[in-house]
Each structure stands twice: as C-alpha cells, then as structure tokens.
Image: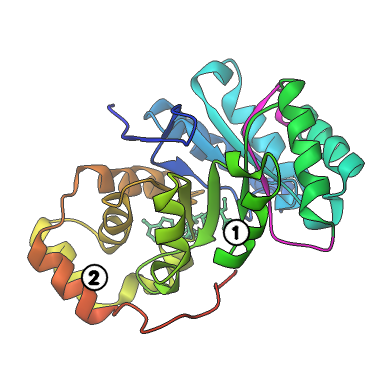
Amino acid sequence: MNMPQISLPDGESAPAYGQGTWHMGESRSRFADEAAALKLGIDLGITLIDTAEMYGNGVAEEIVAEAAKGRRDELFIVSKVLPYNASRNSTIDACERSLKRLKTDRIDLYLLHWRGSYPFAETLAAFDKLKQQGKIRHHGVSNFDRNDMEEWSRIAGGETVASNQILYNLARRGPEWEVLPWCRKRNISIMAYSPIEQGRMLGHKALGEVAARHGATSAQVALAWLLRQDGMIVIPKASRQEHVRENLGALDLKLTQQDLADLDRAFPPTKGRTSLGML
Ligand SMILES: NC(=O)c1ccc[n+]([C@@H]2O[C@H](COP(=O)([O-])OP(=O)(O)OC[C@H]3O[C@@H](n4cnc5c(N)ncnc54)[C@H](OP(=O)(O)O)[C@@H]3O)[C@@H](O)[C@H]2O)c1
C-alpha cells in the first residue's frame, strides 16, 4: 500500500496515518487480541504506531512490541513521557523503561505528554541527550497550545520540535484558530488524536449523508477530512480488526467541495480563540 507521508521540519518524512493504543493493555485477557489488531494494521501497511508510558501502565508498549516482532525497521514508533517524569534525569529513565517494554533500541518520535510542572528546559535537555545517544530520533510535544509552543520553541533546541499531538477532529475545531496555523507555518506536524471522537461523533446525520454519497462509512469520512490537510498525522485507535480495515479505507476517500461545505455547516469552525481541549 502507498501510505501518504508528511515531512518533518528536518526534511525527514513520517507516515500521515497510524494506529493509536490508548486503553490497550488495560486487561491482560485482551492482550493477544489487541496485539493482533495492531499486527493486522502493520500487515496492511500502517507503519506508524502511537503509544505512551501511561497507556495500560506500560502494557500498551508491550503490546506494540508483540505486534512489531521482527518488523521494527519498518515502523515509526511514537511514545510519550508523563509530565511527572519530565525532569532532566527522570525523562531519561522513563525513556529507557519504554525502550525495554517496546523491545527496541530507539523511539522515532518521543513526546512530552502534556505540560507539567518541570521547566521545559529540563525536559528538552533530556530529549537532546536521548537524541545524542540515539535512543530517540525526534522529539515533540502534546496538548500544547500556541503559547506553550512559543515558549518551548524559544528555548535552545526547542525549535527542532517535530510534532504537536492534539485533540483535533470535526467536532473539535478550536485548534484551527491559532495553534494549527502557527505549527503549519513552521512545518511542525500535527498529530490529530481522538480523530473520530472515540466513536461519539459517528452517529451524526451529516457524516452519514456524506458517507452515503461515497458508499463509505462515517468513520472514513471523519478520518478523510483530517487526512486531506497538510502536515497532519491521523492516529485512530482500533482494537477490533474490522475497525482497522474499515478505517484504512479513509485513505481512498476523496471528499468533494460539496462534502466539505456540508461538513462545515454541520461542524462549524469555532468563532474566536478557545482553549485547547484535552481527553
Ligand atoms: N496525547 C494525548 O493526550 C492523547 C489523548 C487521547 C488519545 N491519544 C492517542 O490518539 C489515539 C486515538 O484516540 P482515541 O483512542 O482517544 O480515540 P479514537 O481513535 O477517536 O476512537 C477510538 C475508539 O473508537 C472505536 N472505533 C475505531 N474505529 C471505529 C469504527 N470504524 N467504527 C466505530 N468505532 C470505531 C474504537 O473501538 P475498538 O478499539 O473496539 O476497535 C475505540 O473505542 C489514542 O489511542 C492515543 O494513541 C493521545
């Protein structure tokens, strides 16, 4: 499959579509099924996987390792350090624990999960050291609003930030006001999390109508709406194999001007600045 790519600020590329893993690893009895869903995704060509030390208390990273067995070099693995661990030394320790659980020697993109109380300079110093050691290839942030992005980028080394992972979907258009254009201007990629609003938006009439015109599903329309945007990485989570297959169909769906106008009417852009949502 020809997976669309986006370019990172340093000119490297990354897949525009990946698999999320939040809520995986929360029950040992589902471990095998969750790994099988991720593995199916990899078999179908989805090489980016988003995880975090927080998910399933580390078990989601073990599930990624299970799914990725023997395939590491094909993958682009994203993980995150919790803000409570984001001091200079603890970030390094947290990353090393993640590497062990992921059974790999490197994380492709390592993010600060959200802003906590440690100064950004401490976390950045740790990210720099991890880069020098080859343990992470790129660093990024998550749940950062424009002000956070500006503050982070002003610190030496902060300008190399590769991505900001935020809550962004048709029903959450606040980021379009400030943080999206700010990042785009600097070629900083956006990872849109909860791209189908954890399933809650799928019953919306307008989504169903657009989907029907294409013989597609509501989830595919919601994902295609994000995928058409430059510099956007979209990471739906699916632990059911039928969802993995269905969502991937979004890559073949091209929305028309009429579709986009109808979606704008049903999910209007926010008028004015709103604070960034977070799930
Ligand atoms: N940085 C952050 O703070 C942050 C916050 C939230 C999420 N994330 C990342 O973003 C990823 C995606 O977000 P998310 O997991 O919150 O929400 P999501 O991807 O919008 O939705 C996931 C939910 O929708 C269901 N689903 C998937 N495809 C479906 C389909 N075609 N039809 C109906 N239901 C479908 C899944 O069910 P099944 O699992 O049963 O298939 C799951 O319950 C996360 O997994 C995580 O990696 C990051």
**Count of labels in the image:** 2
Q: Who comes first in sequence, dot 2 or dot 1?
A: 1
Instruction: State the separation of the CA atoms marked 2 and 1.
Output: 35 Å
Residue under the image location 87 percent in, 43 percent down = 88
Secondary element type, mark 2:
helix
Query: Would you place residue 143 above or below residue 278 in this image?
Result: above
Give the number of the mark in front: 2 or 1. 1
Q: Badge 2 is on which residue? A: 207
Locate the C terminus and report the quarter of the image it occupies: bottom right
Query: Would you place residue 215 above or below residue 159 in this image?
Result: below
Residue 110 lies in the magenta stretch: yes
Q: Nearer the viewer, residue 106 or 186?
A: 186
Numbered range of the magenta stretch: 101-117
Which color scheme does this rendered protein use? Answer: rainbow
Q: Is residue 102 visible?
A: yes
- Crowd around label 1: few <14 · some 14–19 · many ≥20 (10 Å): some
Q: Badge 1 is on which residue? A: 150
Secondary element type, mark 1:
helix
Locate the N terminus and report the quarter of the image it occupies: top left
Q: Where is residue 62 shown, x and y percent of the image?
A: 71, 35
Residue under the image location 65 percent in, 44 percent down = 158
Residue 209 lies in the magenta stretch: no
- Amino acid type indicated by mark 2: Leu
Q: Is mark 1 within 8 Å of ligand 1?
A: no
Left or right side of 137 for 265: left
Q: Nearer the viewer, residue 110 or 3?
A: 110
